[in-house]
Amino acid sequence: MGTFIGILAITWGVFILYSSLFKMKNRDYKNQSPIGVSGYFEFEFLFRLLSKSPWPLIKGLTVLIGFSFVTVGTTIIM
């Protein structure tokens, strides 16, 4: 079971890294939806706050999250 979860985390991390490095454009890092649409006010407020940051900072955080998933997956497998 641990191996399966590790492989799943590594796959998810690689997907995040690929998307953030090659597929996402500058406008994808900005939140354009109105607050209150999804019902998760806290997340929408957090994303609205993050969208005011410069996009290279947000892209760096996204890459860091991808590397974190790969690292956690590797640690779980070992």
Image: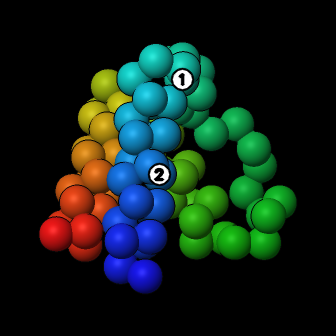
Foreground tag (2 vs 1): 2
11 versus 30 height, above or below: below
> Residue 41 or 3: which is nearer the viewer?
3
User: Label 2 amino acid?
Assistant: Trp
Residue 77: mark:
none
Mark 2 or 1, nearer chain start: 2
Q: Counting other residues with Cα less than 10 Å from the Cα at mark 2, is it few (<14), some (14-19), or many (20 or more)?
A: some
Picture coordinates of residue 67, whole percent (x, y):
26, 46
Please state if 41 lies on the left or on the right of 64 as rendered.
right
Q: Which residue is mark 2?
A: 12
Please tell me which residue is depicted at 25% across the width and 72% down the height of the picture: 76
Q: Identify the element where label 2 is drawn.
A: helix
Residue under circle 1? Answer: 24
Counting from the top left corner in percent of width and height, residue 78 is at 16, 69
Question: At x 58% / y 65%, what residue is drawn?
Answer: 43
**In the figure, residue 56 lies in which quadrant?**
top left
x and y, in percent, of residue 18 in the image: 44, 29
**How many discs mark residues in the rendered view?**
2
Report the side of 54 relative to 76 (left or right). Answer: right
Instruction: Name the foreground residue: 78 vs 67.
Output: 78
Residue occupying the point 48% across, 40% down: 15
Inspect the image, locate mark 1, and give the three-letter code of the amino acid beneath it. Met
